[in-house]
Amino acid sequence: MINIWEVNETNEMIEKENLDVRTITLGISLLDCIDSDLERLNRKIYEKITSTARDLVTVGRDIENNYCIPIVNKRISVTPIALVGAAACRSPEDFVSIAKTLDEAAKKTGVNFIGGYSALVSKGMTAADENLIRSIPQALAATEFVCSSVNVGSTKTGINMDAVRLMGEIIKETAEATKEKDSLGCAKLVVFCNAPDDNPFMAGAFHGVTEADAVVNVGVSGPGVVKTALEKVRGESFEVLCETIKKTAFKITRVGQLVAKEASAKLGIPFGIIDLSLAPTPAVGDSVADILHEIGVDYAGAPGTTAALALLNDQVKKGGIMASSYVGGLSGAFIPVSEDQGMIDAVRAGALSLEKLEAMTCVCSVGLDMIAVPGSTKASSISGIIADEMAIGMINQKTTAVRLIPVIGKDVGEIVEFGGLLGYAPIMPVNSFDCSRFVDRPGRIPAPVHSFKN
């Protein structure tokens, strides 16, 4: 049982340590909207989303007011649109019309983002998958709230290198299509390996085909809370360090569980999962990098950083998993550069490189996230970076992702402002040596041998 005393215990965390519920995400299945007529399909999608999510924002605000718990975002995720639109869409432009419908539905319901403009192509692409992928630059340029994701690999199937090569080109095209906004479209596009069906965090959220007709997922956060707790045990043993992280993660997750249960009851929609990730914001004191500093490294990227991050990620999961009925999504520690002031400081100090970030993704929850690179970066180089990160996910049986932003017209050392939760970032250098002969090979990288356990 969760009671008001548990909530009161977190008041100081909320007021002084940046504790928040990062998102209530309402997952909505659009499978019953499928239609061979594009106009009817768009109408069904709009009606299904606006009717199912009509009370989402109001309920979120009610919970905020009743419990004084900040809920930063209210979001919607939908069934991957490549599946929903396959019967009606014959061209990328047809899919763009659906993106615009999703955007209109997001405006109507008042949510911050809508995710699921997605394709799942880890083993191969259908014509609909390819049309959706090729539509992404235009779709993200023409919409405000739509987020897109493409899953190009998995431990069971390997890595679809045709899709990897295509995504390098699509990211560059998206950057060009949104260059007037510092290539902001790329901040709403993520490439996955082993994408979970129930991720509440954007840009990678979609409502998987294994899910119910509608579910409520909640993503909690609180890097500032963890950092403050660790300040009180500075210099203590690893045992004390780990116990402190676990206990703090438990308290953070209990807040999320309360919000999820309340939202589920008020909306009349089943509770799905809690994602107990530590997701930073640009606010001072709300940084995963600052936690790593408190654990004992001068800057994120210093020797020992990967080990410190591995410890943090594991203890967050161990503490949080006992606090919720259902834990899912990504769960652990995010390391986005632009959204984390400590990461930005580490890049500026020369402590953190793209290569070190890649090493850190071996032990964290996601991958190379919100990294701004020169606009002149070649599509083949972007594909190579994607392939490297997908390989880490495939071999380690974990979710990995890439959200790179080649900012057109900007180069290493310049700063790009994205605004809001997306923050700002220094442009990071990319290895300039060529990998085009590798990424131009057709086909896919086979699954590793341990994937054949059934």
Image (tube, rainbow, N blue to C red):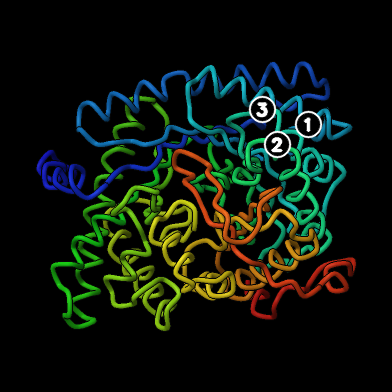
Q: Badge 3, how many Cα within 10 Å: few under 14, some, many 20+?
A: few
Kind of residue at disc 1:
Phe
| Distance between mark 3 and mark 1 Cα atoms | 18 Å
Residue at label 1? 95
Name the element at disc 1: helix
Residue at label 2? 81
Q: Are marks 3 and 1 in contact (CB under 8 Å)?
A: no
Q: Which mark is residue 32?
A: 3
Frontmost of labels 1 and 2 is 1
Kind of residue at disc 2:
Ile
Q: Are marks 1 and 2 in contact (CB under 8 Å)?
A: yes
Frontmost of labels 3 and 1 is 1
Q: Badge 2, how many Cα within 10 Å: few under 14, some, many 20+?
A: many
| Distance between mark 1 and mark 2 Cα atoms | 8 Å
Q: Where residue 363 sits: x, y (%)?
A: 48, 73
Which comes sooner in the sequence, label 3 or label 2? 3
For the residue pair 349 and 58, the one nearer the viewer reads as 349
Kind of residue at disc 3:
Asp
Q: Which mark is residue 52?
A: none
